[in-house]
Image (tube, coloured by chain):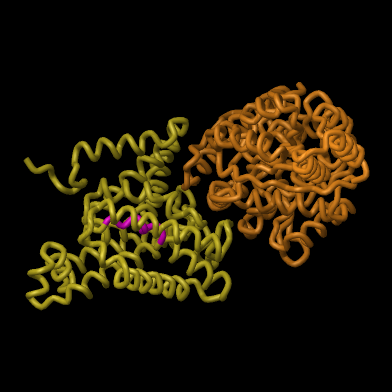
Chain colours: A orange, B yellow
Amino acid sequence: MSGRFPNFNEQETRMGKKMNWLGAALLAVGMVGAAQAQTVKVGIIAPFSGPFAHYGTLFRAGAEAYVASQGGKIAGQNIEFVWRDEGGPNPANTRTLAQELVVKDKVDYIGGIVFSPNASAVAPVIQESKTPMVIFNAATSDITTKSDYYIRTSYTLWQVTVPAAQHAAKKGYKRVVTAVSDYAPGIDAETAFKAEFSKLGGQVTESIRMPVRTTDFAPFAQRIKASGAQAVYVFLPGGPPNLGFVKAYQENGLRQAGIEFLGTAETDEFDLQKFGDSALGLTTLFHYSGARDSAANKAFVAAVNKQNKEAVINYATVGAWDGMYVIHKMIEATGGKRDGDKAMAAAKTLKWESPRGPVAIDPNTRHITQNVYLRVVEKGAGGLLINKEVQTFPAQVDHGLVK
Amino acid sequence: VTLLANILIDGIAYGMVLFIIAVGLSVTLGLMRFVNLAHGAFAMTGGYLAAWLVGEQGWPFAWGLLAAVVLTGLLGMLLEALVLRRLYRRSELEQVLFTIGLTFLFVATANLLAGPEVQLIPLPGWLKTPVDLGIRTLPAQRLLVIAAGLAVLLLSAWVLGRSRFGIWLRATVDNTGTAASLGIPVQWVYALTFGVGAALAGLGGILGAELMPLEPYYPIKYLVLVLVVVAVGGMGSITGSAVAALALGTIETASKYLASDWGSLFFFLSMALFLAWRPQGLLVARRA
């Protein structure tokens, strides 16, 4: 707060010089301006309504829990969140929201965003206004190349898929089938797996693309079974498709046939309990498990539970939490003043212990460098299913941008 | 040969799920000529009730299913008596607007009460075990769906074609005034038919939940699929709906085995062709 006073005094003296009938009004305006400047405004764009509203809830729980864990203030500054509803994939609308946040609400930082097309659409706005934007989720690699003011604290499909291919190769698999949902992230995942796996001498014998609105996955399960593959690498969006595929994998006896399931976000904590015992033993490669056994993670889980008992602890919650850590450090570096370039310079050198493990911001891609873990679904305390980390692939960069 | 058998088995199983979800709509939209876009909402209600009774209250699966179906039917009758009855004489646009609004109400309520997550109906052990068919295994649950689909088909064909109630219903729909003057309790006929339609929707929601998981947006997500089945099958023809569901289910499954890159193209292409060939429904020959 003290950092603000010179600014205030300056305005006061200037006004003292020509104290007339306007002066009082100007003084009042000046005071309001100064009072506002003591608060750092953070605009969060996320889905708060519709089928994806749970992301908004989790972002909010993670971000607010972070501020609460710092005693309600960050680097001595008050934080004011401005929440904006992204709804669903809608780039034009998201761009308008970002514009309003910058022009009308005069936010210092923007955070959030679930969908990749929405994240890319914001680029011109943040580039021109020099507003740092921390992406909490959107996972397409090339987003951060579209503006110098993007930082990302989530993951990319390349980042988690390359270790998946390495795991398959190390297990001695020669023939693997990929089965992905037929839309941009699915294709991204398929390309990433193929590239790495063939580099390691394996062969992707069949690449199945499943229509997005598929409800009956039995035919695909039968195809995978008939292909004679040793493992199947899958990518499916969360919710019903995810549940449907795992069910089909079980019911059609793929596990008994010895075809290993290799996924990424499929056993995410948001869906995990719904799988029931059919999920036991599924292997996934991902950057965060809510059940991670570390002091930083325990503190994180406790803070989020205190903020919102209902909130699921998963990659979205931790993405928001770490995103707020980055914003925290940027506020610290700029003393709470609006200075996009200085903030970005500070963010690029960050290195810290996150609930997910040791992480850093890669200065070139402005994407988070982090461990990727091989996890197996197990029964944890209280009979709940957990993703148990069994192997670490340390310090993975975004393999989509850093080849 | 294995491939062909696989396509047929999965196609019939999928088609029966489609049929069992669509049959209720075939009754309300087809027989009663009421544009009931809230059909999916009743299916979801049945599913949620079953999930709650079996999953949370620990009822046995069979009883939970029965109770959920009956309760959904009663809810349908209640809504019919209170509000929907007033819409029969209104234009189709008003029926569409009202029932889609009703659907949104159900969506929001489900979201509020149970949250956005997928709800599961726990299956008893005997339904979970895969059954060996010789060439491959099929989950027992699918066999139950196929059996239930056949039972619904036979039962409804008998009720509509042979029973007194069927005669009353057809008379009431064709000419309400005359039917009433002949002493048919038309209001009861409407309410009961709508209730049965809703109950069948609920049954479909429960049995189909393995393929179409229950979540708040269920009523909107699967509406198109259901409307396609009823449209291709022909208004009010339950046998037609069954044939349409099996044909479309097999086509969709075949395309998943043979040409999945084309997505749902073949499903909708065949819908267009069927409708061009038999606009009145698959089993109704085109009148000159």
Quadrant hosting residue B76: bottom left
Which quarter of the image is occupied by the C terminus of chain B?
A: top left
- Image coordinates for residue A254, horizontal then vertical, percent: 59, 46
| Horizontal relation, residue B56 to residue B29: left or right | right
| Horizontal relation, residue B128 to residue B156: left or right | right
Quadrant hosting residue A130: top right
Residue A193 vertical placement versus B285 (above, below): above
The residue depicted at 37 percent of the width and 58 percent of the height is B38
Residue A174 in sight in this render: yes
Queried whether the magenta region covers residue B96, the answer comes back as: no
The residue depicted at 74 percent of the width and 56 percent of the height is A386
Q: Nearer the viewer, residue B36 or B157?
A: B36
Q: Nearer the viewer, residue A285 or A30?
A: A30
Total label count?
A: 0
The residue depicted at 49 percent of the width and 53 percent of the height is B217
- Image coordinates for residue A230, horizontal then vertical, percent: 64, 37
The residue depicted at 84 percent of the width and 54 percent of the height is A72
Which contiguous range is marked in magenta? B35-41
